[in-house]
Image: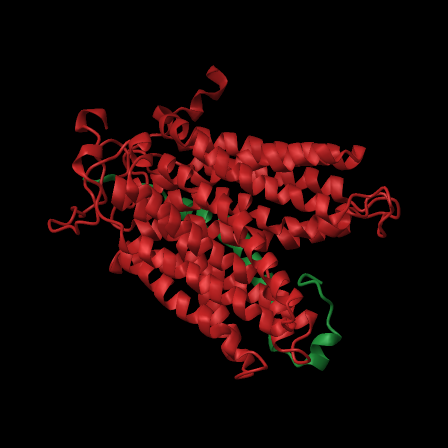
Amino acid sequence: MPLLSFLDREKSVAQPGFSRWLVPPAALAIHLSIGQAYAFSVFKIPLTQLLGVGKPLPQDWKQTQIAWIFSLAIVILGLSAATFGKWLEAAGPRKAMFASAVCFAAGFYISCLGVLSHQLWLLYLGYGVVGGTGLGLGYISPVSTLIKWFPDRPGLATGMAIMGFGGGAMIGSPLAIKLMAYFRTPTDLGVGKTFLVMGTLYFVFMMFGVFTVRVPREGWKPEGWTPPANQSAMITTRNVEVNAAFATPQFWLLWVVLCTNVTAGIGIIEQASPMIQELFKGRIGPIAAGGFVGLLSLFNMGGRFFWSSVSDYIGRKPTYFIFFALGALLYFFLPQTGANHLNNVKLFVAIAAVLLSMYGGGFATIPAYLRDMFGTHHVSAIHGRLLTAWSTAGVLGPVLVNYMREYQLQHGADKASAYQGVLHVMAGLLVAGFIANLLVRPVTEKHWLAERNV
Amino acid sequence: MSENSSKSSPALILFAWLLVGLPLGWGVYNTLLSSMKLFQTPAAAAIRPASPTK
């Protein structure tokens, strides 16, 4: 379509003089928007009170029905990233970002219709399926472009974008609360109008990313930078095609690395508020626990930038060794800080904050690890397929935590002690991740893409 | 000469970073306000509203 031809990859090739420092803000515009998904919980209560306007009626939706909207969005995120990754590499980041913006905004608009007509399936379709597709496309769209613009600092570059996904909830949550308060009337909670406005705001914001992003010209490299002569064997100079990468043990080892790191992180995120209240009963109430959750989200975001930048200096494999070794120790030790043992709130908060920083760091460092293993040619597509590990962890983590805790409570453990078993299992998961990381070796020559095909 | 010797206007680069930095800063500020409740005494925290934005 000629009208949309500006989205073509060849139209987004940077002209001489274009600064690469314009690309991270373009990527952040996408990630800060789609990161709103992590703030979806602010709609949980209002969506269960739409008909009763402030108090639930029997015909209102139940919390368990609402919870599926977010779960569906995260599962579709992984599936769409895995499915459309290869298309993205051919179509270029601008077209993918545009498609992401259209899907993400359309998800809000369809959900608005669902709220106005009180049809739950429209929210599943809208925010869950259509919006989830936008999440997946948006998440991976800037990755390979950033890595190509920053061959000297790939961890820093992708960390900046993925930090945006962590920060998106911090914008999306207060924005939604303020909008719902603004649109609320005695007969309407304002959720539908909030969806409409948020869809439009995010679409416009994402268009800034669409129009700003550029891909580097063939053969471009940063001024004064030459690839190091004695590069680590863990950083390839070759490329691996996405389907070939999918068949390598390295891909599946990194899949385990991501899955275990995310599952363990969810172990804290899922239970953060009740955990601190039950471990320090009488000292920490619900309001202070809310503050603890906020603090964790700051460390989750900051860790994405910090650890991915550190990985540029110490290497990807050592960075994950830190996550898994230190993480396992800290998870094992965390229950000892509770009121039954050391009774030290500050120590508990400090350990949880470090753990959450490493959870975020795991997300942000994985694109650069993939680039080191498989080259830049199909890195977004490979990253897309690896994100199925996130979808898996998103289901596995909460199930593991909730069922294990329930089991322990049924067998006579008190609420505070029940966390011990859960956190020790998380430590065990990180040991499994440590072993997977240990087994990662450079990809063998038979998987390399011939230079003429790059 | 490599193109990142920067012909893009510094004002444009600053504008781009402000466009994404300001909303992010607003979000971080709100979250920081919320997390401060962890460090308040239980009596002081109890009379504060739950929402970080209010």
Q: Position of residue A304 (x, y in %)?
A: 42, 56
**Residue plotted at (20% across, 37% down):** A238
| Chain identity for the colour green used in the image | B
| Chain identity for the colour red used in the image | A
**For this view, does A281 lie left or right of residue A252?**
right
Q: Position of residue A83 (x, y in %)?
A: 45, 30
Q: Position of residue A300 (x, y in %)?
A: 48, 60
Where does the C terminus of chain A fall, quadrant-wise?
top left
Q: Nearer the viewer, residue A342 or B9?
A: A342
Q: Is residue A240 above or below residue A183?
A: above
**Residue plotted at (37% across, 34% down):** A381
Quarter of the figure with residue A218: top left
**Residue plotted at (60% across, 75% down):** A279
Which residue extends farthest front? A411
Q: Nearer the viewer, residue A197 or A232?
A: A232
**For this view, does A425 lie left or right of residue A379?**
right
Quarter of the figure with residue A329: bottom left
Q: Can I make out residue B14 in this image?
A: no
Q: Nearer the viewer, residue A433 or A149?
A: A433
Q: How many numbered discs sit on the rendered protein?
A: 0
Q: Nearer the viewer, residue A361 or A147?
A: A361
Quarter of the figure with residue A219: top left
**For this view, does A278 lie left or right of residue A433?**
right
User: What colouring method underlies this structural image?
Assistant: by chain
Q: Is residue A348 above or below residue A187?
A: below
Q: Position of residue A348 (x, y in %)?
A: 52, 75
Which residue extends farthest top? A1
Q: Can I make out residue A325 in this image?
A: yes
Which residue extends farthest left? A229
